[in-house]
Amino acid sequence: MRTRTLMALVLTSLMLVPMAGAEELVTRVALSDEGALGENDLGIRAGAVSPAGTDVLVVGMEGFARLISADDAGKALC
């Protein structure tokens, strides 16, 4: 009986020990304000990145569409 109790305590304590060391992940993303696409609400509905990852197409209500450089968001291509 004592062996079963001891075994249960050992197994329970093993379940409480983390299986992998949890390292604190450090991620850094630099954000900056590149300006506005328009003076009023454009009703942005969708966006897509080009296959090369160099351009972003933004589509909104009332026929709004703008092609923006992914490298320089302040530079509208169309």
Image: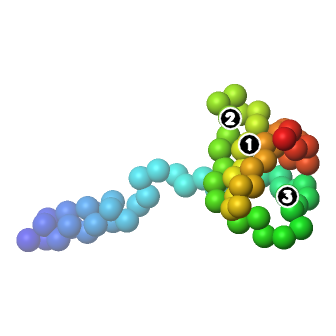
Q: Is residue 26 visible to the viewer in this orientation of the structure?
A: no
Q: Quadrant of residue 75?
A: top right
- 57 vs 28, nearest the viewer: 57
Decide if residue 77 is in sight here. Answer: yes
Query: Quarter of the image containing the C terminus?
Result: top right
Is label 3 in a helix, a strand or a loop? loop
In the foreground, 12 or 2: 12
Q: Give residue 31's position: percent from left, percent from top.
A: 83, 55
List x then y, in percent, for residue 68: 81, 43
For label 1, the residue is 56
First in sequence: mark 3 or mark 2? 3
Front position in the image: 22 or 77: 77
Residue farthest toward the front in the current orientation of the protein:
62
Q: Are marks 3 and 2 in contact (CB under 8 Å)?
A: no
List the residue tagged with mark 2.
Answer: 50
For numbered disc 2, what is the local secondary structure?
loop
Q: Which residue is mark 3?
A: 37
Give the label on residue 77, or none. Answer: none
Q: Amino acid at mark 3?
A: Leu
User: Residue 70, position in %: x, y?
Assistant: 80, 40
- Identify the residue at horizontal 26%, vertical 61% (top origin): 11
Residue at mark 1 to residue at mark 3: CA–CA distance? 13 Å
